[in-house]
Amino acid sequence: MTTTPVIQREPERPILSELEASAPDRSRRRSTGVSATIRRHPLTSFFLLAFAITWAPVPAGSFLAAGPLLAAVIITAIVDGRPGLRALGRRMILWRVGWQWYAAALLVPLTVVLTSGGLAVAFGAPGSVFGRLQISSLLLLFALRLVVPIMSPIGEEPGWRGFALPRLLAGRSAFEATLVLALIVALWHVPLIFLPSEDLPPIFLLATVAVTFFYTWLLMGTGGSVFITIVAHAAEGVIGNRFTGSDGFSGTDETHWILLYTAGWCAVAIGLLLLNRDLWFSKAPVSIAANGSRRDTVVGVDSVRLDIRSARREPLAPGEP
C-alpha cells in the first residue's frame, strides 16, 4: 500500500534553511566584544566588512573585487563555524542543475550584450568591433573569470548570492530581498566610476540593479546554486569589456551601446518580474538549503523543486516526485 506524503506546516515559524539549522546554538556561546556583535548582526557585519575590504585600496587607485568573498568567509566562520563554511562551499560548487539553467546563464547575458552591440552598429557604429572579437581569447577570459578569486564572478557571487541573499529572503519577498541587495551592490560599485583604470559609466549602476534580479532568478530556480550565478556573471562581462575597451566602440557610439546595454538588462529584469509574479511577490517564507535543495517538512520526502513552487512553497500533489 502506497502512503501518501503528508506535508506538515508550521505557519507561525518560518522554515529554517539548512545553514541556519546547522549553525551552533548561539545562545550557548559566551562571547563578548566584536565576535558577539557579529553573531547578533551577521548580515550588517558582512556588508560593512565587504565594503571595507573592497574600498580599502581605492585611495591607491585599486578596487578589490574579492571583498564580498573574503567577508562571507570571515563572517560565516565566526557565526556558523565549520558547518557554515562547508555549506557555503557546497553552494559554490553545486553544478548539478538542469541544462536549461546553464543555457539561461550563458545565453541571456550573451544575447543582451550582442543585441545591444548589433543595435549600436545599426545606429551607425562601426561593425569592425565585432570582427575584432577573437573566440579563443574570449573563451580564455571566460575560464579565468570562473576560477580567479580577484575577478568579479568568484570575488562577488559567494558573498552577494551565497551569504547575503538567503538571509535577506528571511521575512521578505524575493522582490524586496533582491531590491535591497541590488541597491547595496550598486553602491559597492560606485568607486569604479572615479578610478581612472576602471572608468565605470554611472548608468551601469542601473544595469547592476537590473542584473541582480537575473541572478536571483537563477539562484532560486536552481535551489541555491551559487555556481550557476558565477557562470552567468562570468559570461556577462566577457564581451562587454571588449566593447568599451581600446578595440571597442568610442565616442557617441560607445554612449549608444552603454545605453542600449543598460536598457537590455532593465528589459530582462522587467520581463522576469512580469512573467513570474508569484515568484517575486509572494510573502510566503522562502528558504534556500545549504546543500542546494529546497527543504520542505514532508513525511518520508526530501523534496527538490526547480519551479515556481520553490518560492511559493505550494504543497506537492500526492505521488508527485
Image (spheres, rainbow, N blue to C red):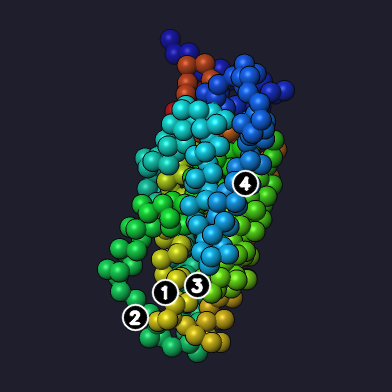
- Residue 47: image tag: 4
- Tag 2's secondary structure? loop
Q: CA distance from mark 3 to mark 4?
A: 25 Å
Instruction: Count residues near mark 2 (Cα–Cα under 10 Å), then give few for <14, some for 14-19, many for 20+.
Output: few
What quarter of the picture does the C terminus occupy?
top left
* Residue lying at 56% horizontally and 87% vertically, measured from the top left: 252
Rendered residue at 42%/37% (across/down): 89
Q: Give the residue pinned by disc 3.
A: 197
Q: Marks 2 and 1: CB-CB under 8 Å?
A: yes
Nearer-N-terminus badge (4/1): 4
Quadrant containing the N terminus in the rendered view: top left
* Image-based side of 194 in relation to 149, left or right: right
Q: Which numbered circle lies on residue 94?
A: none
**How far apart are labels 3 and 2 at the CA level?**
22 Å
**Marks 3,4: beta carbons within 8 A:** no
The Cα atoms of the two marked residues, 2 and 1, are separated by 9 Å
